[in-house]
Image (tube, rainbow, N blue to C red):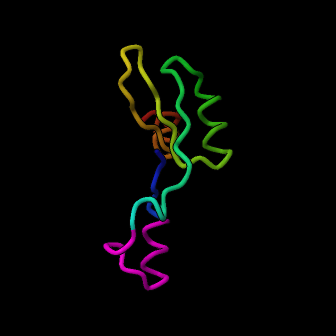
Amino acid sequence: VGAIIEEQVLDLVVNHKDPRQVSVREIMRKPFPIVAADVSIEEVAGLLKAGHPSVLVRDTVGNLGILTKYDLVAQIAGK
C-alpha cells in the first residue's frame, strides 16, 4: 500500500503520458506516516517538514483522518 499525490499525476501529463494508461503501482510512492490522535502538533509538523505531504491520524477506534500542511497552517492561524 502506498500513496499518490497531485504532483505525480501532473508529472504524467507534463511527460506526455496518458494517466489512464498508467497503473497505480507504477507511480505509487511510500505510504504516508500514521500517528495517534493524541500526538503533538510539533511531531506532525516535523513529519510534514521532513518531506511527507500528508500524515494519517488514527483515532482510538481505528478511524483514519488525513492532515496536510494546509490543515496545520489553518489550525495555527485559527481558521
Q: In percent of the image, x 63 and y 38: which residue is there?
A: 47
Q: In percent of the image, x 38 and y 20: which residue is there?
A: 62
Outermost residue on the bottom side: it is 16
Q: Is residue 21 left or right of residue 34?
A: left
Q: In this view, does 65 lie above or below 3?
A: above
Q: What stretch is highlighted in magenta?
A: 8-22
Q: How many labels does the image show?
A: 0
Q: Is residue 25 above or below residue 49?
A: below
Q: Is the magenta stretch mostly helix, strand or loop?
A: helix
Frontmost residue, 69 versus 3: 3
Frontmost residue, 29 versus 39: 29
Is residue 17 within the magenta segment? yes
Q: Is residue 4 above or below residue 77?
A: below
Q: In percent of the image, x 60 and y 43: which residue is there?
A: 48
Q: Where is residue 19 in the image (x, y as percent from the top left)?
A: 36, 73
Is residue 32 within the magenta segment? no
Outermost residue on the top side: it is 60
Q: Quadrant of residue 20?
A: bottom left
Q: Is residue 54 above or below residue 34?
A: below
Q: Position of residue 58 (x, y in %)?
A: 44, 24
Q: Position of residue 18 (x, y in %)?
A: 36, 79
Q: In percent of the image, x 39 and y 71: which residue is there?
A: 22
Frontmost residue, 33 versus 76: 33
Q: Where is residue 53 in the image (x, y as percent from the top left)?
A: 54, 49
Q: Quadrant of the C terminus?
A: top left
